[in-house]
Image (tube, rainbow, N blue to C red):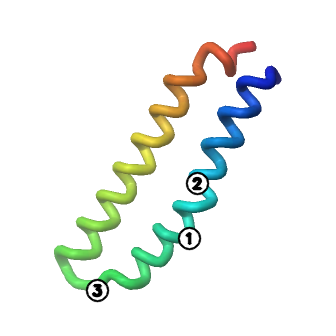
Amino acid sequence: MSFVTYESMKRSYTWLSVLLPLFTAVIFLVPDNFMTKPTVLGILLFMSVIMYLTYYVRNRKLLKD
């Protein structure tokens, strides 16, 4: 694995280590009713997918090495 790939992965996983406890706190603190919790969880899922896709697109060439 090249140094550039390592540095980009380290940066991404640092963000995930910061956001994961925050996402968990949001999940537990949001009131549980028919609209609020599914909406918030959907937004968090959408944000997670977008983060993963941007990481994959940015590092697609680097990960092939």
Determine the residue positioned at 37% across, 59% down. Answer: 44
Q: Circle 1 is placed at which residue position?
A: 21
- Residue type of the residue flagged with mark 3: Pro
Q: Is residue 40 left or right of residue 56?
A: left
Distance from Cα at disc 3 to Cα at disc 2 = 24 Å
> The residue tagged with tag 3: helix, strand or loop?
loop
* Amino acid on which disc 1 is placed: Pro
Quick one: label 3, few (<14), some, or many (20+) residues within 10 Å? few
Q: Which residue is mark 2?
A: 16
Please determine whether, in this image, residue 17 is positioned above or below residue 12.
below
Report the side of 58 relative to 11 (left or right).
left
Mark 1–mark 2 distance (CA, rounded to whole Å): 9 Å
Assess whether mark 2 and mark 3 are in contact (beta carbons under 8 angstroms).
no
Residue depicted at x 34% and y 65%: 41
Q: Is residue 27 above or below residue 54?
A: below
Which residue is label 3 attached to?
Answer: 31
Q: Which one is earlier in the sequence, the residue at label 1 or at label 2?
A: 2
Provide residue 35's location: percent of width, then percent of height: 17, 74
Q: Earlier in the sequence, mark 3 or mark 1?
A: 1
Q: Where's the C terminus, which quadrant? A: top right
